[in-house]
Image: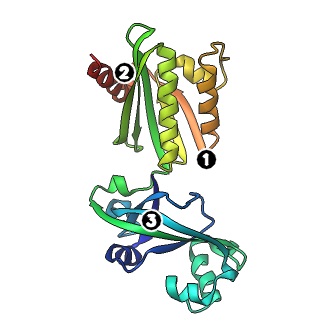
């Protein structure tokens, strides 16, 4: 889920129902109509441990303009600016002198639903994270599952998931786990990702050291490569199985449920 973070005074207005819009310059999250957005209150902007989720919002309308094309009606209705110069000066505090009258801005309207979380890890926009993945097959081929675990840099778990794949091979399960994990990491806004898995074959193929000779693995290999290009930075590292216990445990949990 995408996130929008607000300074505390603005977050309070959203929470009370007095504010239902935001302006975003140089939108790197590609926010669009019907997107579901997690709303975060940066209680103390310098201390992410104080941040909290105040609810979710569904985007109802998106207007794309240049700052110089903002009308006085929009200024007073949405953000109470008194002039276009005031708008430029305000956003230069965040983006520097690259902000000019021709800078693109998205005016985003949303319907807010309040829900409170006190876990600061949930409220932080995970721009940097670790991903552990594992796939397993009991029989090879046989009943198989794929799982991933997304963690903060201190290895505290942010999200984990596993799915049953039916009868397939161990290598295909490993690839499916990797694809699912990388895909989910992108969905929640991670930009720099360190991937760890205990399949030397898959890691070496993704890193280009080995060729993909199995035609069954080629399509999902290409999917992972394509997804990787969407990150600011991503690395793939082989680790021994004993260091991949979180993802391995999730695989076995799914397989045990199928008995």
Residue 242 numbered tag: 2
Q: What is the CA distance from the residue labelled 1 to the residue labelled 3?
A: 20 Å
Q: Is residue 66 above or below residue 40?
A: below
Residue 60 image position (x, y, % from top left): 49, 66
Tell me, yes or no, whether the two marked residues, 1 and 3, touch with CB atoms within 8 Å: no
- Mark found first going from the N terminus, 3 or 2: 3
Please name which of the two marks, 2 or 1, marks the residue nearer to the observer: 1
Considering the numbered disc 3 on the image, is that residue within a helix, a strand or a loop?
Answer: strand
Q: Nearer the viewer, mark 3 or mark 2?
A: 3
Residue bearing the label numbered 1: 232
Identified at 41% across, 68% down, the residue is 111
Mark 1 vs mark 3: which is more N-terminal? 3
Structural distance between the alpha carbons of marks 2 and 1:
29 Å
> Quadrant where the C terminus lies?
top left
Mark 2 residue element: helix
On screen, 69 above or below 176?
Answer: below
Q: In the rendered image of this protein, does residue 45 appear above or below residue 221?
A: below
Q: Across the whole image, how many numbered discs are drawn on residues? A: 3
Q: Earlier in the sequence, mark 2 or mark 1?
A: 1
Say how the picture is coloured: rainbow
Left or right of 130 in this view: 30: right
Residue identifier under label 3: 5
């Amino acid at each position: 889920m995408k996130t929008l973070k607000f300074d505390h005074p603005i977050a309070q207005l959203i929470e009370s129902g007095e504010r239902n819009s935001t302006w975003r310059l140089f939108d790197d999250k590609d926010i669009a109509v019907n997107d579901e957005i997690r709303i975060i209150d940066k209680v103390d902007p310098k201390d992410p441990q104080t941040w909290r989720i105040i609810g979710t919002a569904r985007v109802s309308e998106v207007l794309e303009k240049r700052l110089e094309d903002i009308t006085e009606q929009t200024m007073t209705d949405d953000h109470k600016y008194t002039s276009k110069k005031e708008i430029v000066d305000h956003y230069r505090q965040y983006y520097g002198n690259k902000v000019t009258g021709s800078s693109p801005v998205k005016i985003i309207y949303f319907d807010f639903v309040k829900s409170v979380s006190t876990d600061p890890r949930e409220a932080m926009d995970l721009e940097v994270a670790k991903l552990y993945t594992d796939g397993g097959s009991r029989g090879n081929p046989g009943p198989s599952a794929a799982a991933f675990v997304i963690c903060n840099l201190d290895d505290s778990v942010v999200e984990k998931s596993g799915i049953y794949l039916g009868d397939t091979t161990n290598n295909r399960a490993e690839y499916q786990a990797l694809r699912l994990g990388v895909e989910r990491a992108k969905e929640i806004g991670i930009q720099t990702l360190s991937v760890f898995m205990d399949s030397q074959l898959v890691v070496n193929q993704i890193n280009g050291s080995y060729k993909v000779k199995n035609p069954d693995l080629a399509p999902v290999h290409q999917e992972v490569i394509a997804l990787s290009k969407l990150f600011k930075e991503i690395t793939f590292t082989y680790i021994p199985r004993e260091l991949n216990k979180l993802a391995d445990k999730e695989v076995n949990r799914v397989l045990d449920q199928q008995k």
